[in-house]
Image (cartoon, rainbow, N blue to C red):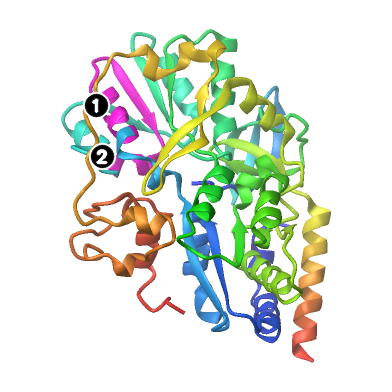
Amino acid sequence: MKFITEFRRSELAEGLISQIHRKSKTQARFMEFCGGHTVTIFRYGIRQVLPKTIEMVSGPGCPICVTANADLDKAIALAQIPDVIIATFGDMVKVPGSYSSLQEVKADGADVRMVYSTMDALNLAEENPAKSVVFLGIGFETTAPTIAASILQAEEEGVRNYYVLSMHKLCPPVIRAILDSGEVKLHGLICPGHVSTIIGSHPWEFIARDYGIPCVVSGFEPIDILQCVDMLVAQIENGESKVEIAYRRGVQPEGNQQALKLMEQVFEPCPAQWRGIGEVPDSGLKLKKEYQHFDAELAFDFDPGPPYEPMGCICGDILRGVKTPLDCSLFGKACTPEYPVGPCMVSSEGSCSAYYLYGESFEG
Amino acid sequence: MCLAIPALIKFIEDKEAEAEIGGITRRISLWLTPEAKVGDYVLVHTGYAINILDEEEAEETLRLLQEIAELAEE
């Protein structure tokens, strides 16, 4: 068992596709919340093999895409402070903020380093004791515990020049905000797999119970997505709405208790700004009082200025599932992966990037 | 961004481990999965093992999918 190739076997895909076609009678719209799922769906052409009864829409599950310009501007302003090293996951570097990007300020001399893990950022801090290392804390519940662990490790090892700019986002509150807006009517939700690895399947139950929407937690291989769609179709045809896990090898209903414990030790919920969605209560994470000496926002004096949104960019509407990249007048013309205007074209998991990379025949 | 890939734990030292990911050995953190053992497959996200993969559940899922595939052929 390698846990990868087994879930890409074509005969299993054919079986599932044929069962979905046989079972699906009711017109239904499913949202895949997670950008990782969007990539799998496009890369393997899953939209094209589903029956006409099923429409797929992409959700806001790309942490880079949903980071508001106001937050990006803070990161860019921090990068311009002397003796500050910005440590960040790669995709963030190219995202345009209101006036500049990390890439541009790096070209002007700012010290911006791409890291694979917070462990690398901690090492940077230890290797550069005369400098301050600011890690850009972006990501959902999957990533937040790794950042909590780095803060606890820094505390344990007495590292005093390591800081975090906390821009973390929580998934269940934003799904509630999208459903409450009533802008997009959903009949099924493909719940994010690795967010659920951490939080478990219980936090999705309000969607099935209060909104009557079937929920299935999916893995990231093509067979996982097809199995998830098959389970959603079965719930719809049986008139049910409950939370199920298709990704049983990677997700337990109770989640990862150790990860949740570390996250709760270091962070507490706060309101957060989401691009295109606005402020959502309790959908962000800030450092608890005991760990505020790691908070970059409190440690440095900086003024990013008022945020500004680029004209014509509809990333916000795309993130809410209201429009697709094909509705955008900039798509593929003024906005490309080489010269992105909005974040959905920068991130490899953004909808615009997926549409651009995998052609234009995926409207299904 | 929530990408996590399966890795096989080869060697554990305190809260870190050496793990094989697609033929490459990497150092990973076990802060989030202190119960992981040598020989376990874990899901690795940004250098941290975030869960131990459940082999029995994976086999059960594959068995179910095989049944669906056989049913479709009939």
State the separation of the CA atoms marked 1 and 2. 10 Å
- Find out whether residue A204 is within the magenta segment: no
Is label 1 in contact with label 2 (beta carbons under 8 Å)? Answer: yes
Q: Residue at x 74, y 59 (%)?
A: A242
From the image, tell me which residue sits under label 1.
A304
Return the x and y of residue A305 as percentages of the image width and height.
21, 28
Q: Confirm whether residue A274 shows in the render.
A: yes
Rendered location of residue A168, percent (x, y): 48, 34
Q: Is residue A169 above or below residue A32?
A: above
Q: Is residue A82 magenta?
A: yes
Taking the spot 55% from the left edge, 17% from the top edge, the residue there is A288
Furthest toward the left, the residue is: A108
* Three-letter amino acid code at the position of disc 1: Pro
Q: Is residue B42 visible?
A: no
**Total marks placed:** 2
Q: Residues within 10 Å of mark 2 (few under 14, many from 20)?
A: many
Along the line of sight, the residue nearer the viewer: A129 or A214? A214
Tell me the amino acid under the disc marked 2. Gly
- For image coordinates 37% across by 64% down, the residue present is A323
Whichever of labels 1 and 2 marks the residue nearer the N terminus, that label is 2
Q: Nearer the viewer, residue A100 or A69?
A: A69
Point 52% across, 52% down: residue: A180
Where are the magenta residues, as a range?
A71-94
Location of residue A83 with respect to A120 vertically, above or below: above
Question: Which chain hosts label 1?
Answer: A
Element under disc 1? loop
According to the image, label 2 marks what residue?
A: A97
**Label 2 chain ID:** A
